[in-house]
Image: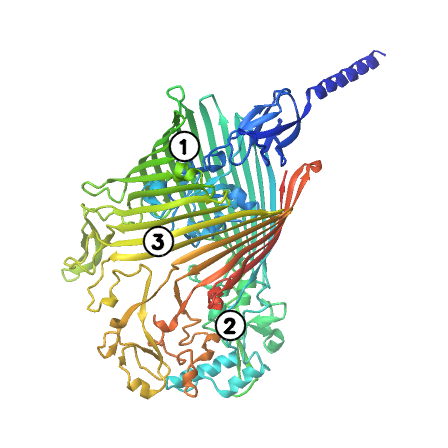
């Protein structure tokens, strides 16, 4: 009875507590307004211990259930975010409208600081990556950048200056992520990134010192935010379909045309008519092989890939964290043997913790694993040919790939214990070609490559408000380590070469070449590591005086050391820098930057161990002036101008060029061979060597027009690169065998960039359409080159990417045509060879008849995007154009000579029967030295416009009953269409995996 009473009492107490709790939880309807009393729709309200979120409706209202006096967080685009107490008395929350480009959503990461867009007087492009991923499922940095930022050529080349410095979370990673330009697409997933800043002018990038020469791409990864819970998962699966493969002649056609080439060269045909006809009939493939590698036997119709990514973040005012987990798998196209595949796994974390009121800890870590499995191909591992190289070089009649075991019944000792394909075929081969594609894919073992990267940086931030308002300090240390290993199972296999009775199809013998070998242990082929550390400390001062004087300043010291296995000495970088940014009344902006850097390259100089690089920028927001302020068509107009000069050592790799040193040369004997010694050559240094320099200035504007529906920005840029460190071998006498380095040469790049974006809404349909464009012209001003008698041979005053070659006049029709033309000095000339123009009229075609015939990089690149939204549907499309460059047919697929494999490209060759219809020179078994050289004959325009991406999204919202805020399903296509007069050529890949067209589907879940 006593126990029953206790149970009743406990139950009553629980009910009472529950009623009290329900009473404490109050549901209220509230409204968010601006400081002018207008309701704000689409504002995000975060509340509760679990950081739950709701969004205001079209009249700014929202309803929540929470405990009174609990803090809620409200934010909306274009307004200053704020914290409010959940009050029983007040149901109106006021957000202050921020001037355009000064709000919380307008913050931009710049080197070692964060500024608003309005404060920046430079040419800085910004991308909010989560916003992009809401409508376009990109997976890599290059995918995000391509076609979205004005001034970018391809993905990373800023204004044609070359590969920029890549910075992740404040630390340059040029020696952390090896070969970033090639592998960077997979070294960081798009889902890890919060935003990207593209620093296009030198003044904006200056705080990264000498390495900022080609601009900076600043990547900032995701972090936790107070009172914001993030839990989302993304899964994508897709297929890659080859756009095209090389096309080669069959064995019979190849032999016919090779005979034709022999006759053209005055030689006897190599192949008999019996061989050609026997091959064409296909009745005896063992005797007359005809092998095509680009078929379904070896290749699948498509390869597949899968991506998975998860983002988790949360926090309050004291501590925040973010975690990103990602996995990607790529499967290969090869259809024989074990499937080629590669896997990448990443784990990235970020932690912010307030240790005390004035000290905050920041921690970042990244761990990446890459693992790939592929067949082991025959040959030296540094120069071996894979499937794609074999397919583009091995002749179709070289040997039969497979020999039926049934054909070897008279040679039972060969079949017994042999590696058999599908249990019924021996591997074909010859003494000269002992490898076999089937053998490589099935019996030669496996090749595994494994790498891991660990990157950790941690730092402290100090709030020094106790000294003076707005003063802060911070320090950060970064460590990284990259390791790569390559292991193989080095099996081997025998091949078999059939021989036949002369004049008969009867098999005479089968010769075994090599042996079948099966090993049980892995062999380490290669391995290396990169490691490094970096440190920076800085002081920040940010303050607004009298509500009109906004001042931001930084002073910093930066040091980085990177090393790898093959370096004698580590790469060391160090500099101090400062930035002072001032904005008056949200209208006038002035910025001064400077970097004082040291270089290990110049430590042997007299007075040039260190160099100072200054920069200055100015901005004027004209739309704040009375004569524009009330213009309803011009909502925002800002003028920018900046100038900078950078001292750099980026292109100088030899750290011994500033002092004399000796190097041992060949040995010599004396005393009748009884003794020997080594000669020493002096390599003179130049202690007065100067740093290379780059000067840059930019002038531009940014604007928002027509009630903020139309945005236009444009700028003119100019770069001058000078004082190159070179050996002037062409213009200085070589008196001692080695010419010292000196400063000589200059180049310039100038151009314009333009960005346009328009947004509108018609009923429930939302439209966002935009374009960006860059026009860039590089030019050599002075260069170390011989003084040519003919000005057209000079490189100076011509584009840096100029293509030099001969001017072709077509093909020689016959011998009379040759006799009537000047001599050509490239070997014996026959009818059907390329005819060149005698530019200097000296009666002979030689090296003096080369001139500029084109340029190799596009002058204009553009991007177009379109986004349409209607209710739960959204369509996005992105296109890119490249114009103003020339390419050239080259390589063995187009320049077919000697014993090369014959492509279909030669079918329009010159023949004596139809000399006027030829589009290709005569075939030859020689090197074709007259025909196969740079000339206008092989040149073509590379202009094209590509539909890069199309993605259709469907979003399902309001599924809180299962804890899901939103589910977005998508269908996507990439690399879909190319419009060009040279589409077939531009899409074709020879000797490597084909260019792919991708299709994928997936889902993004937000909890």
Q: Residue furthest right?
A: 1
Q: Position of residue 307 (x, y in %)?
A: 58, 49
Along the viewing direction, whichever of 822 and 690 lies nearer the viewer: 822
Q: Earlier in the sequence, mark 1 or mark 2?
A: 2
Nearer the viewer's eye, disc 2 or disc 3? 3
Along the viewing direction, whichever of 308 and 866 lies nearer the viewer: 866
Element carrying mark 2: loop
Mark 2 Cα-neighbour bin, 10 Å: few <14, some 14–19, many ≥20: some
Q: Which residue is mark 3?
A: 751
Q: Marks 1 and 2: CB-CB under 8 Å?
A: no
Q: Earlier in the sequence, mark 3 or mark 1?
A: 1
Element carrying mark 1: strand
- The reply to whether residue 346 is in sight is no
Q: Residue at x 61, y 74 (%)?
A: 405
Report how far apart the C-alphas of labels 1 and 2 lie in the structure.
Answer: 56 Å
Along the viewing direction, whichever of 257 and 221 lies nearer the viewer: 221
Q: Which residue is mark 1?
A: 476
């Amino acid at each position: 009875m006593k126990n029953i009473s206790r149970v009743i009492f406990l139950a009553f107490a629980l009910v009472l507590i529950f009623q009290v709790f329900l009473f404490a939880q109050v549901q209220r309807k509230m409204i968010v307004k601006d400081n002018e009393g207008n309701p704000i729709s689409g504002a995000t309200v975060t509340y509760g211990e679990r950081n739950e979120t709701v969004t205001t409706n079209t009249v700014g209202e929202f309803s929540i259930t929470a405990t009174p006096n609990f803090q809620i967080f409200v934010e909306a685009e274009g307004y200053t975010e704020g914290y409010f107490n959940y009050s029983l008395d007040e149901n109106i929350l006021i957000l202050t409208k921020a001037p355009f480009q000064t709000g919380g959503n307008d913050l931009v990461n710049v080197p070692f600081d964060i500024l608003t867009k309005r404060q920046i007087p430079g040419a800085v492009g910004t991308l909010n990556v989560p916003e992009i991923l809401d409508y376009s499922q990109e997976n890599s940095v290059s995918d995000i950048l391509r076609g979205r930022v004005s001034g970018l050529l391809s993905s990373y080349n800023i204004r044609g200056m070359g590969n920029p410095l890549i910075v992740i979370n404040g630390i340059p990673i040029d020696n952390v992520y090896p070969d970033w330009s090639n592998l960077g697409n997979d070294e960081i997933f798009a889902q890890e990134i919060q935003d990207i800043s593209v620093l296009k002018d030198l003044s904006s990038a200056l705080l990264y010192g000498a390495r900022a020469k080609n601009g900076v791409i600043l990547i900032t990864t995701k972090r936790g935010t107070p009172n914001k819970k993030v839990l989302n998962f993304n899964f994508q699966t897709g297929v890659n379909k080859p756009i095209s493969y090389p096309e080669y002649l069959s064995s019979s056609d190849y032999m016919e045309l090779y005979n034709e080439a022999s006759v053209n060269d005055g030689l006897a045909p190599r192949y008999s008519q019996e061989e050609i006809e026997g091959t064409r009939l296909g009745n005896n493939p063992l005797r007359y092989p005809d092998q095509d590698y680009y078929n379904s036997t070896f290749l699948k119709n498509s390869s597949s890939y899968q991506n998975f990514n998860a983002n988790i973040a949360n926090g309050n005012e004291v501590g925040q964290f973010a975690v990103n987990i990602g996995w990607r798998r790529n499967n290969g196209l090869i259809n024989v043997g074990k499937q080629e595949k590669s896997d990448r796994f990443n784990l990235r974390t970020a932690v912010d913790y307030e240790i005390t009121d004035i000290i905050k800890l920041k921690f970042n870590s990244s761990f990446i694993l890459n693992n790939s499995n592929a067949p082991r191909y025959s040959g030296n591992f540094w120069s071996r040919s894979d499937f794609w190289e074999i397919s583009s070089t091995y002749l179709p009649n070289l040997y039969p790939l497979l020999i039926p075991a049934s054909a070897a019944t008279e040679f039972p000792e060969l079949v017994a214990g042999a590696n058999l394909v599908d249990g019924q075929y021996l591997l074909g081969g010859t003494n000269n070609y002992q490898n076999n594609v089937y053998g490589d894919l099935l019996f030669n073992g496996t090749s595994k490559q494994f790498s891991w990267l660990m990157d950790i940086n941690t730092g402290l931030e100090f709030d020094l408000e106790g000294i003076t308002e707005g003063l802060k300090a911070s320090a950060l240390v970064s460590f990284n380590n990259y390791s790569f290993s390559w292991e193989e199972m080095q099996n081997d296999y025998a091949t078999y070469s059939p021989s036949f009775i002369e004049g008969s199809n009867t098999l005479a013998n089968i010769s075994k070449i090599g042996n079948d070998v099966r090993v049980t242990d892995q062999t380490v082929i290669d391995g290396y590591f990169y490691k490094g550390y970096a440190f920076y400390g800085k002081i920040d001062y940010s303050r607004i005086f009298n509500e009109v004087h906004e001042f931001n300043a930084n002073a910093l010291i930066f040091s980085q050391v990177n090393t790898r296995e093959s370096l004698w000495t580590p790469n060391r970088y160090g500099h101090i820098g400062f930035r002072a940014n001032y904005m008056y009344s949200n209208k006038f902006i002035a910025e001064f930057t400077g970097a004082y850097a040291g270089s290990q390259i110049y430590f042997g100089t007299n007075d040039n161990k260190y160099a100072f690089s200054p920069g200055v920028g100015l901005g004027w927001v004209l739309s704040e002036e009375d004569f524009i302020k009330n213009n309803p068509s011009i909502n925002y107009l800002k003028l920018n101008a900046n100038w900078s000069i950078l001292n750099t050592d980026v292109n100088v790799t030899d750290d011994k060029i500033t002092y004399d040193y000796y190097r041992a040369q060949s040995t010599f004997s004396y005393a009748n061979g009884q003794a020997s010694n080594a000669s020493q050559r002096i390599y003179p240094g130049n202690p007065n060597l100067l740093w290379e320099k780059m000067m840059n200035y930019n002038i531009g504007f940014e604007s928002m027009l027509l009630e903020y529906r139309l945005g236009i920005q444009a700028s003119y840029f100019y770069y001058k690169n000078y004082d190159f460190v070179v050996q002037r071998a062409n213009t200085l006498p070589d008196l001692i065998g080695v010419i010292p380095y000196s400063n000589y040469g200059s180049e310039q790049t100038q151009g314009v960039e333009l960005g346009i974006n328009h947004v509108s809404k018609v009923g429930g349909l939302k439209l966002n359409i935009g374009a960006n464009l860059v026009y860039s012209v590089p030019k050599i001003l002075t260069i170390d080159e011989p003084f040519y008698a003919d000005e057209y041979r000079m490189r100076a005053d011509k584009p840096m990417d100029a293509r030099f070659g001969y001017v072709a006049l077509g093909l020689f029709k016959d011998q009379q045509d040759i006799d009537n033309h000047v001599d050509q000095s490239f070997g014996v000339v026959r009818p059907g060879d390329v005819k060149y123009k005698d530019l200097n009229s000296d009666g002979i075609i030689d090296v003096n008849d080369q001139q500029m015939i084109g340029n190799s990089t596009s002058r204009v690149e553009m991007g177009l995007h379109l986004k349409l939204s209607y209710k739960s549907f959204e369509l996005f499309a992105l296109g890119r154009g490249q114009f103003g460059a020339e390419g050239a047919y080259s390589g063995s697929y187009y320049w077919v000579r000697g014993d090369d494999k014959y492509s279909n490209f030669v079918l329009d060759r010159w023949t004596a029967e139809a000399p006027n219809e030829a589009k290709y020179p005569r075939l030859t078994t020689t090197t074709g030295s007259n025909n196969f050289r740079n000339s206008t004959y092989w040149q073509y325009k590379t202009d094209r416009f590509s539909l890069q991406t199309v993605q259709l999204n469907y979003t399902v919202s309001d599924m809180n009953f299962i804890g899901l805020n939103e589910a977005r399903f998508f269908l996507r296509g990439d690399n879909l269409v190319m419009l060009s007069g040279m589409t077939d050529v531009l899409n074709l890949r020879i000797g490597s995996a084909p260019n792919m067209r991708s299709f994928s589907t997936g889902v993004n879940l937000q909890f």
